Image (tube, rainbow, N blue to C red):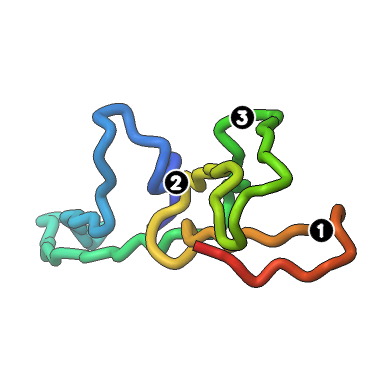
């Protein structure tokens, strides 16, 4: 058996994913009269981490007053990953900015 179609879980035309594919397999001998047998092949397709997470906006710009209480939400950022299951989980981190460590993740 060979892979002959795109098996990417997230690239389906109906918008749904098929994790299990069931195929009928036939074996025949080459002499006459031909004898044959059939079997069912169940193939489970595992998702691969092939999609990058993407922010829903290129820029998040907000303001906060200097009198805002500690713990005040300033802005929310959102990202999505088209991968399924654990491959689609996202972790956010601040890589530059204030030298004070922010511990208020929600």
Q: Quadrant of residue 57?
A: top right
Give the total of numbered labels: 3
Eyeballing the image, is 46 above or below 78?
below
The mark closer to the camera, 3 or 2, is 3
Picture coordinates of residue 49 (x, y %)? 56, 58
Of labels 3 and 1, earlier in sequence is 3
As measured in the structure, the alpha-carbon distance from the residue carrying label 1 to the one carrying label 2 is 31 Å
- Between 81 and 41, the one lying in front of the other is 81
The residue identified by callout 2 is: 8
Q: Secondary structure at mark 2?
A: loop
The residue identified by callout 3 is: 57
Picture coordinates of residue 40 (x, y %)? 14, 64
Tell me the number on the disc at residue 95: 1
Side of 31 where 103 appears, left or right: right
Report if the CB atoms under discs 3 and 1 are less than 8 Å apart: no
Picture coordinates of residue 5 (x, y %)? 42, 40
Q: Residue at x 41, y 36 (%)?
A: 11
- Between 24 and 92, the one lying in front of the other is 92
């Amino acid at each position: 058996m060979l892979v002959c179609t795109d098996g990417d879980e997230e690239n389906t035309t109906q918008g749904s994913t098929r994790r299990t594919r069931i195929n009928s397999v036939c074996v025949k001998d080459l002499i006459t009269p031909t004898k044959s047998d059939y079997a069912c092949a169940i193939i489970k397709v595992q998702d691969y981490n092939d999609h990058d997470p993407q922010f829903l906006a290129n820029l998040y710009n907000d303001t906060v007053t200097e009198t805002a209480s500690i713990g005040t939400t300033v802005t929310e950022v959102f990202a999505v990953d088209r991968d399924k299951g654990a491959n689609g989980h996202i972790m956010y981190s601040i890589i530059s900015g204030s030298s004070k460590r922010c511990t208020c993740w929600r």
